[in-house]
Image (spheres, helix red, strand yellow):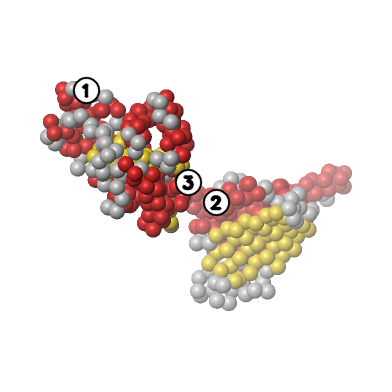
């Protein structure tokens, strides 16, 4: 039932003055309140009437409410200490009493009867001599509700009703209205009311004296309820729109991410193709020109007067030829096209060791069977990037390179004895694949494009970079473990 419909029943029948239960009449009344002062006034009248008539009262409440009630009763001239000594005033702590009756997160019937039933029975006995009555106030249900256990609160209300079938007392329960602040609390509040014989609304209603005031208040509540339902409907519409927008945004991000990956793959492919073209151009054009120039210098050297000049020129040209050859090989080693990754890796490692001063060892098979060009090229580029990182960033003095076949895949590993990578950076790479520089990102992308993966391990003793790429089934004999 919606809030508006609940308030749109027969208005006149919903507008009577709130009836306070008399402690002499068996009843189970629930009172809702906004301010503690209102609760204590109502409770003071209920308990004070019982004590003033020589009857008994049982109060199971919080320390704050017990103390406030005692001050109010004493101010009205009621001697609570004397009534307690006579057994007519029993004040218990709600939290402590609740702990005694709970079992597995819910009030237990046997424990409730043993603890609370005994208290009610003792109070009845204290005033039995003059046909007295017992008025009881319980706040344990409010503690259960505010602690997020509404079903347990309702169960405790039911246990009070069962106890009323065997013992005579009038019971008052109380809940702060501030606890019912969510939309779903409406149905639970109705369940609580259903367990009681009467309901006392909060002070904003009970303070209204005339029927006209009460009707006007109900009309105002109806307006607020209608506005609230409209707001809830609008909020749900906005939330649904946001959910759809979020889903669309996620889809767009996935599409853009896929597009960027395709672009990255395309750029790497174009980069490799361009390197191969430049390498050919250097070797076939500039390299040949330098060779021709060297031949010319050989002819010119025969002039005795210019021996020293021609010797210097020849040395310079030899260096140019060597540099061009090295640059061409670094861009795309011709040995890889001819005999594969193992030979190209061996040539590169030897040259890099001479140029960098690093002590490098290479463990690779001499298997003549070839891998697909894309895999061999990816392995060679990863080797280049890894050794460049070792030389520039690790502070290492040596590194070991391993190329082997393992479980249907080819593995290239480069391990150095350097200072390692900071753990924060390493963790970010493991979580997101980012944050470790362009070189490692390039390795990661090359592995991913071929269905492989890149593993990065590092500590204070060095760093290990390992790329694993699956190989086609027809490369059975390739790169067997050495």
Residue at the front extreme of this rendering: 129
What separation in Å lies between label 2 and label 3 (alpha carbons)? Answer: 49 Å
Q: Earlier in the sequence, mark 2 or mark 3?
A: 3
Across and down, in percent, residue 160 comes to 32, 49
Classify mark 3: residues with Cα within 10 Å, few (<14), some (14-19) or many (20+).
few
Question: Disc 2 marks which residue?
Answer: 431
Rendered image: mark on residue 103: none
Residue toward you, 308 or 211: 211
Across and down, in percent, residue 229 comes to 23, 35
Total labels drawn: 3
Question: Disc 3 marks which residue?
Answer: 96
Q: In screen coordinates, is 259 left or right of 277?
A: left
Q: In screen coordinates, is 79 left or right of 327?
A: left
Question: Disc 1 marks which residue?
Answer: 209
Kindly indicate whether the residue at mark 3 contacts the one at mark 2 (C-beta within 8 angstroms).
Answer: no
Secondary element type, mark 3: helix
| Position of the N terminus by quadrant | top left
Tell me, yes or no, if residue 65 can be seen here.
Answer: yes
Looking at the image, is mark 1 or mark 2 nearer the viewer?
1
Q: Earlier in the sequence, mark 1 or mark 2?
A: 1
Relative vertical location of residue 213 with respect to residue 331 in this rendering, above or below? above
Residue at point 43% right, 40% down?
Answer: 86
Q: In screen coordinates, is 267 left or right of 136?
A: right
What separation in Å lies between label 1 and label 3 (alpha carbons)? Answer: 39 Å
Residue at point 78% right, 54% down?
Answer: 397
Looking at the image, is mark 2 or mark 3 nearer the viewer?
3
Across and down, in percent, residue 109 comes to 36, 56
Classify mark 2: residues with Cα within 10 Å, few (<14), some (14-19) or many (20+).
few
Residue at the bottom extreme of this rendering: 477
| Position of the C terminus by quadrant | bottom right
């Amino acid at each position: 039932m919606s809030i508006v419909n609940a308030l749109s029943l027969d208005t006149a029948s919903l507008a009577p003055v709130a009836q306070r239960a008399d402690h002499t009449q068996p009843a189970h009344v629930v009172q809702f309140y906004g301010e503690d002062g209102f609760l204590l006034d109502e409770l003071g009248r209920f308990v004070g009437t019982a004590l003033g008539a020589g009857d008994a009262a049982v109060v199971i409440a919080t320390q704050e409410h017990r103390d406030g009630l005692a001050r109010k009763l004493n101010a009205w001239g009621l001697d609570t200490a004397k009534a307690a000594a006579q057994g007519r005033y029993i004040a218990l702590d709600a939290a402590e009493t609740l702990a005694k009756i709970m079992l597995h997160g819910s009030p237990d019937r046997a424990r409730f009867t043993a603890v609370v039933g005994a208290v009610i029975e003792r109070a009845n006995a204290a005033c039995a001599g003059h046909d007295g009555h017992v008025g009881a106030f319980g706040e344990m249900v409010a503690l259960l509700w505010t602690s997020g256990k509404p079903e347990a609160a309702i169960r405790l209300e039911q246990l009070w009703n069962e106890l009323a079938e065997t013992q005579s007392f009038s019971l008052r329960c109380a809940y702060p209205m501030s606890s019912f602040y969510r939309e779903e609390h409406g149905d639970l509040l109705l369940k609580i009311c259903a367990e009681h014989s009467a309901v006392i609304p909060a002070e904003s209603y009970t303070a209204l004296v005339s029927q006209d005031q009460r009707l006007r208040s109900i009309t105002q509540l109806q307006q607020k309820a209608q506005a609230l339902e409209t707001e809830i409907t609008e909020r749900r519409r906005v939330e649904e729109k946001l959910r759809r927008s979020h889903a669309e945004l996620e889809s767009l991000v996935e599409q853009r991410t896929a597009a960027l990956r395709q672009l990255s793959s395309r750029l790497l492919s174009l980069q490799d193709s361009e390197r191969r073209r430049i390498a050919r151009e250097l070797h076939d054009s500039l390299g040949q020109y330098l060779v021709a120039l060297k031949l010319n210098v050989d002819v010119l050297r025969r002039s005795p007067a210019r021996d020293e000049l021609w010797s210097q020129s020849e040395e310079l040209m030899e260096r140019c030829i060597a540099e061009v050859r090295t640059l061409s090989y670094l861009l795309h080693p011709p040995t890889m096209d001819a005999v594969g990754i193992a030979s190209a890796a061996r040539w590169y490692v030897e040259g890099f060791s001479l140029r960098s001063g690093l002590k490098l060892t290479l463990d690779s098979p001499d298997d003549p069977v070839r891998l697909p060009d894309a895999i061999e090229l990816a392995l060679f580029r990863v080797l280049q990037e890894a050794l460049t990182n070792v030389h520039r960033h690790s502070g290492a003095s040596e590194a070991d390179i391993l190329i082997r076949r393992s479980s249907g895949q080819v593995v290239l590993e480069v391990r150095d004895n350097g200072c390692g990578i900071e753990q924060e950076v390493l963790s970010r790479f493991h979580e997101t694949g980012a944050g470790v520089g362009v070189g490692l990102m390039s390795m990661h992308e090359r592995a991913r494009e071929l269905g492989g993966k890149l593993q990065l391990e590092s500590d204070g003793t060095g760093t290990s970079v390992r790329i694993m790429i699956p190989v086609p089934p027809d490369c059975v004999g390739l790169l067997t473990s050495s």
